[in-house]
Amino acid sequence: MAELDSALYEGLVMHHRFTPQRHRFIYRVFSACLDLDELDELDAKHRLFSVNRFNLFSLHEKDHGKGGDQLRKQIAELLAAHGYTSASARIKLLCYPRILGYVFNPLSVYFCYNADDQLEVILYEVTNTFGNRHTYLLPATPDAAGPVRHHCGKKMYVSPFMPMDTAYSFRIQPPEERIAVCIRQTDGVMSDNASEHNHGQPILHATFTGTRTPFTDKTLLKAFLRYPLMTLKVITMIHWEALRLWRKKVKIQPRDAGNRYSVSWQDKNGVMHYESH
């Protein structure tokens, strides 16, 4: 029986804020990296994992993208709509699964491969605690050392303590035996031309680094015992760290209602575009 490509990644999340007050925290987590073509098989083969129904662990497709079901089809259509049809041969989603029915994913990452199994596009799906979601669609061009690097302007309100006029730099080690997702946020507005990098002062550095383990009922049970109610811990930590920042008198940023779902994407000429739904 062929081993599934889906896996778990156990590791560390680190946040380091540089300004206006230094603030740092680290905690242990695990993430699921799910091949979207394997969802039915994952559901059928595992007692502890289900798709779109309650279990100890589950993935509910409505928790991602525009909501609703048929997530793989939805992502493939998004890629095709913006000129990247070939990138939908295989799609893997890095996210927290629901644990006992609850999850909050501040960031989910889609790795989109072509028919030659080359990573062609990465989607960064950011969700805030106010119910808004924004996806950054960026072509993947690995550098000589292997990681993928991206740069784009911030398009959605996330933290009450972060201004909107900032930019993101992503450095990604795609999922193999290890995975790394590193985000550096800097001040200053970024040009719509993604090749014009923002070189502002660093505000925040956030990382997830993890090591692969097979996706089995045994490893799921171990993860549950090692990280009980982890997804509840994620949202608790978000509010706890917000309280700590507030106590440090970090300024709260004004927020507009925003859009429930929006997308920004880079075209083949390196120019960024934005649309809301």
Image (spheres, helix red, strand yellow):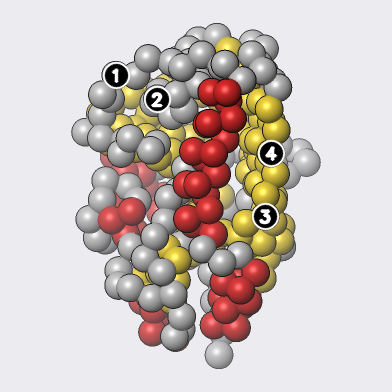
Tell me which amino acid carries mark 4: Phe
How far apart marks 3 and 2 lie (CA) works out to 26 Å
Q: Do tag 4 and tag 2 residues touch (Cβ < 8 Å)?
A: no
- Left or right, residue 108 beside residue 201: left
Pointer 1: residues within 10 angstroms few (<14), some, or many (20+)?
Answer: few
Circle 3 — which element? strand
- Determine which residue is flagged by label 1: 256
Identify the mark nearer the N-term, 3 or 1: 3
Residue drawn at the location 33% of the way across and 35% of the way down: 130
Q: Do tag 2 and tag 1 residues touch (Cβ < 8 Å)?
A: yes
Q: Quadrant of the N terminus?
A: bottom right
Residue drawn at the location 55% of the way across and 9% of the way down: 188
Q: Do tag 1 and tag 4 residues touch (Cβ < 8 Å)?
A: no
Q: Looking at the image, is mark 3 or mark 2 nearer the viewer?
A: 3
Circle 2 — which element? loop
Q: In this view, does 215 lie above or below 254?
A: below
Circle 4 — which element? strand
Q: Looking at the image, is mark 1 or mark 4 nearer the viewer?
A: 4
In the picture, the disc for residue 7 is none
* 180 or 144, nearer to the observer: 180
- Determine which residue is flagged by label 2: 157
- Left or right, residue 46 beside residue 249: left
- Left or right, residue 140 beside residue 182: left
- Determine which residue is flagged by label 4: 25
Q: Where is residue 104 in the image (x, y as percent from the top left)?
A: 42, 50
* 42 or 250, nearer to the observer: 250
Decide if residue 189 is in sight here.
Answer: yes
Q: Where is residue 277 in the image (x, y as percent from the top left)?
A: 21, 33
Q: Is residue 99 above or below residue 263?
A: below
